[in-house]
């Protein structure tokens, strides 16, 4: 990924522009990972009133699930468009969740003010993820725990299936350089980052859930509408190549899917303050 493309990911307006489409297409398939993250943190119904901070909350999937379990939740995102969508979500579901625009690398929150912290598939896009991890640790009380989820680039999932489809459709396409956050997308790297930020009792879990895609080819074509990191790649391809890649993606998904759907691997790191 070029420096210019990476810089686009750090602009709030870029993520605000994709918020409605992201909520429709991506948020529903995020829920299993939200459930797993909260389970690993030990947040269950009836355990009391815990304060949870969700950083880079997107459209509020984790925050909503935590609120359903009885947590007092603050959900933050640096993109106002994402915050608007999650506020509508919480209101529609009757959830008492506070949502605020806030930079995850400079949280306007007091030290030691939360019991639990989460960031799922968001912190990896920060300009400096280590700064974000340290900020999250700062606002946790002693003994508080954080859960960080990233896609697993070492196992099966969307990146690997996209790569296989593109190799079939555009065989002369140069292999992309690893993204800046690649070290957070494998178990050892995520664990190392948590420890470098000062977390202890770190454990990284490899998790796989399945996505059900009713129209994989259409899903592929619309990925840039929901996921800004993929926009430079799609912009570089002619329409005919995208059509071939979409058809190839549908074939690859069919080949790799089970009766439960298309597997997508993630790593979830848990650490204590």
Image (spheres, grey):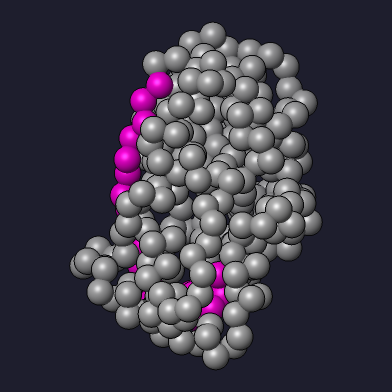
Image quarter of residue 119: top right
Q: Is residue 157 magenta?
A: no
Could you tell me residue 47's position as x and y percent? 41, 21
Q: Is residue 115 visible?
A: no
- Residue 167 in which image quadrant: bottom left
Q: Is residue 215 magenta?
A: yes
23 vs 149, nearest the viewer: 149
Q: Position of residue 124 (x, y in %)?
A: 57, 42
Q: Residue drawn at (61%, 35%), measured in percent from left and top?
A: 129
Task: Please indicate, yes or no, whether residue 223 appears anywhere in the rendered image.
Answer: yes
Q: Residue at x 66, y 24 (%)?
A: 135
Q: Is residue 127 left or right of residue 73?
A: right
**What span is in magenta?**
202-223
What residue appears at the point 40 percent right and 41 percent down from the top-left corner?
Answer: 186
* Image: 108 above or below 154: above
Quarter of the rendering occupied by the N terminus: bottom right
Q: Which of 185 and 67 is in front in this view?
A: 185
Q: Residue at x 55, y 90 (%)?
A: 240
Percent x, y of residue 91: 65, 49
**Foreground residue among 272 and 245:** 245
Residue at the left extreme of this rendering:
259
Q: Which residue lies furthest to the top in this view?
A: 142
Task: Answer left or right for 8 relative to 97.
Answer: right
Left or right: residue 7 compared with residue 175:
right
Q: Whole-percent x and y of residue 77? A: 69, 43
């Amino acid at each position: 990924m070029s420096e210019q493309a990476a810089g686009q990911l750090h602009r709030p307006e870029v993520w605000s522009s994709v918020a409605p489409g992201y909520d429709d297409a991506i948020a529903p398939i995020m829920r299993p990972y939200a459930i797993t993250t909260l389970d690993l943190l030990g947040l269950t119904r009836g355990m009391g009133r815990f304060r949870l901070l969700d950083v880079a909350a997107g459209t509020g999937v984790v925050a909503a699930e935590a609120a359903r379990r009885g947590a007092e939740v603050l959900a933050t995102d640096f993109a106002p468009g994402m915050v608007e969508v999650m506020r509508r979500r919480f209101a529609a579901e009757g959830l008492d969740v506070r949502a605020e625009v806030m930079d995850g690398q400079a949280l306007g929150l007091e030290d030691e003010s939360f019991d639990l912290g989460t960031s799922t598939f968001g912190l990896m896009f920060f300009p400096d993820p280590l700064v974000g991890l340290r900020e999250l640790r700062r606002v946790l009380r002693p003994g508080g725990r954080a859960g960080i989820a990233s896609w697993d680039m070492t196992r099966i999932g969307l990146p690997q299936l996209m790569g296989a489809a593109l190799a079939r459709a555009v065989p002369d396409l140069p292999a992309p350089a690893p993204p800046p956050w690649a070290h957070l997308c494998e178990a050892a790297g995520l664990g190392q980052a948590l420890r470098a930020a000062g977390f202890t009792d770190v454990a990284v879990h490899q998790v796989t859930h399945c996505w059900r895609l009713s129209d994989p080819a259409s899903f592929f074509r619309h990925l840039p509408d929901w996921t800004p990191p993929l926009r430079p790649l799609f912009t570089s391809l002619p329409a005919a190549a995208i059509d071939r890649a979409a058809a190839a993606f549908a074939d690859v998904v069919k080949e790799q899917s089970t009766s439960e759907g298309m597997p997508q691997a993630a790593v979830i790191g848990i650490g204590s303050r």
